Image: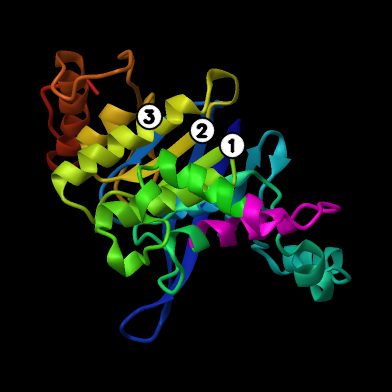
Amino acid sequence: MIEAKSITRFFSVVNEKGLAEGLTAVLNVSLTIPDGRIVSLLGPSGCGKSTFLEILAGLQAPTDGTIHIDGKLVLEPLPATRKEQIAYQRRYRFISPLANGVFRDHPKHDIAMIFQDYAVFPWMTAMQNIVFALRLRGAGKRGAARPRRGDLEEKALFFLGKAGLAGFANKYPSQLSGGMRQRLALARALSVEPKIILMDEPFAAVDALTREKLQDDLLRLWSESGADKRLTIVLVTHDVQEAVYLSDEVVVFSPSPGTIRNIVPVDVPRPRARTGERLIEIQERILAMFQYDINQESEYSI
């Protein structure tokens, strides 16, 4: 379970006059995501969705608030005052010089992240990209024996097959289409067998037909993970139709600073029809929320 409590992220920025000023990207966001759910974070550009996702992943520390995954703290909030900064430095004064050596490749949480720009290594083949991820994750397990190359390649082929790339194991990313590169990113994420996958606009760079195919691939892989250990997926998107079609819940963010505008359950059983009456109704309700934020008026009760 993912539990976010009162997450705020504040940035200091320098304006065009060279003066320091503040920017609050995320403000007092609290959210609970049960295991095995698909949840979309939806909102206008600049509302803090990606910042919040990176805080969930531990790639950024919140200015205030905490993220717990299965009861474990992801990252401590950054020290906000001189007193907190001194206490923070004292607490970690012995660990900091050793941090890279002691904690490198020892992930605290079982998370994989997929970025909008694929983030695959262009100098590696599809198989090599996955084998590298498996080696990195395997090396992070204390006391684990070094995995054999043959075993890693066999596992890589298995997940390439699940993503529809079985015949492209020896191709480089430049030899793959945009949709295939995103399938490669998904196969690599699945190969380390995470409990949680975080996705930041993963299908934004492909055409509409490929996007729909990738959405269906994601749902198929999610369902194949099994009811007893089903993946939790958190997805950032600007696409209302995508959010409603994929998700169990859609978390609607307000314009900057990002706060939770509403949480909309998608109580439609799978498999779903994209043009189903209930899905269209939910899409229209969410679009009405955005319209209300723009014009301060709506025919819907929000």
**Are the two marked residues, 2 and 3, in contact with CB atoms closer than 8 angstroms?**
no
Q: Nearer the viewer, residue 143 or 234?
A: 143
Cα separation, mark 2 vs mark 1, equals 6 Å
Q: Choose the circle earlier in sequence order: 3 or 1.
A: 1
Query: What residue is at 59 percent from the left and 41 percent from the top?
Result: 194
Q: Choose the circle earlier in sequence order: 2 or 3.
A: 3
Label 3 crowd (10 A; few <14 / some 14-19 / many >=20): some
What residue sits right under mark 2 in the picture? 232
Residue 244: % across, % down: 27, 28
What residue sits right under mark 3 in the picture? 220
**Are the two marked residues, 3 and 1, in contact with CB atoms closer than 8 angstroms?**
no
Q: Main secondary structure of the magenta part?
A: helix
Cα separation, mark 3 vs mark 1, equals 16 Å
- Asked if residue 261 shows in the view, the reply is no
- Tell me, for residue 146, which label it has, or none: none
**Are the two marked residues, 2 and 1, in contact with CB atoms closer than 8 angstroms?**
yes
